[in-house]
Amino acid sequence: MSWDVVPATSTVGIAGGIFIAAAVVTIVFSMRLVRLGDALADRTGWGEALFGAVLFGAATSLSGIVMTGVSAGLDEPELAYSNAVGGIAVQTLAIVLADIAYRRVNLEHAAASARNLLFGCLLIVLLATALFASFSPAVTAFGVHPMSVVLIGFYWGGLALITKQGRPLWRAVTTIDTRADVPEAHGSFGSRGMAGLWTEFAAVALGVIVAGWAVARSAEVTINATGLRAGFVGAVLMGLVNALPEMVTAIAAVRQGALTLAIAAVIGGNCLDALNLVVGDIAYRGGSLYHAAGPDQLLVTTAGLVMTGVVLGGLLLRQRGGWLRVGFDGIVLALVYATTVAGLVI
């Protein structure tokens, strides 16, 4: 069987069908990952914030990693870059959807967490570093820009600081609406062994990887057949599928009461998606991926920075209600994303 399931001569209809099928697979598998992730967070004792931002974030980011790597390897650097940063923008918007699903109070009020704030700060550093790389000299070593190494260093350094912190000096004031992250029963998951839970978690994550590969190949065919801008296809279409795991899991997590996990999965997944640029830089053999970024890619990166800053503001302010019952941050996030999409279309 050939690996070219979507060859370059395929029609747009076939590519679109595969694109949609892969998106559906991503949604179904992501819903399963939520239940597994919530159970493992309690069973391991790691807590929803840390597990959601690291392992859960890694699992939901696998499809995006594959999309970026495959696109860069196919000599589509703008598509690869757009997918990585576009996914971050859409995933941040997932917090708004999760907030709408949680009608009791503003989600950022109920799920206050010092670790989520720190991961938001880390994401700002990673995105700003990517912009820094785009405006730095276009030098590479073995085809990789030095800033890729810096990005990895920032991520692991930030992760070490967050995971090894002792008693935090900043604490969220507990209110009647605050939903604490405490272990709870998980139905059939509670009686299963750890080995079985981890095995299924890995198997479902593998399915997400395969779906991501199919999306990347079909997106390449779509660009070649229609002439659509790589920035739009990568940031909006691929970015949407890239963000589906976090969007679905955030809403599902809210519905089952795992509020801290909902926000952690989005912000932690975004931090790992920023590292997708490193994967793309390694896979792209035409030089530095950061310097292949055009105005569209830089626009989406900047939008990601703005949206992350807004989320941090929402987590700090902790409005109970706010504008249209989703808080000021939800409205601003939607406006920033809509403006970004308009900028990619015009």
Image (cartoon, rainbow, N blue to C red):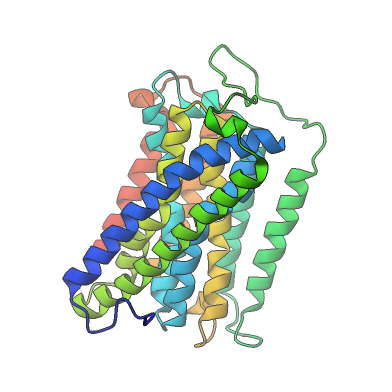
What x and y, as percent, mark residue 305? 51, 52
What x and y, as percent, mark residue 221? 27, 77
Would you say residue 204 is visible in this rendering? yes
Would you say residue 90 is visible in this rendering? no
Tell me which corner region of the image, top left, top right, bottom left or bottom right, holds residue 162: top right
- Quarter placement of the C terminus: bottom left
Horizontal relation, residue 21 to residue 38: left or right:
left
Horizontal relation, residue 258 to residue 18: left or right:
right
Q: Residue at x 25, y 80 (%)?
A: 224
Q: 4 or 15: nearer the eye?
A: 4
Q: 321 or 251: nearer the eye?
A: 251
Q: Residue at x 30, y 71 (%)?
A: 218
Q: Residue furthest top?
A: 176
Q: Residue at x 45, y 58 (%)?
A: 207
Above or below 194: residue 171: above
Tell me which corner region of the image, top left, top right, bottom left or bottom right, holds residue 236: bottom left
Q: Residue at x 58, y 63 (%)?
A: 275
> How many labels were placed on the picture?
0
What x and y, as percent, mark residue 72? 46, 78
What x and y, as percent, mark residue 308? 51, 46
Horizontal relation, residue 276 to residue 158: left or right:
left
Tell me which corner region of the image, top left, top right, bottom left or bottom right, holds residue 334: top left
- Quarter placement of the N terminus: bottom left
Q: Residue furthest right?
A: 166
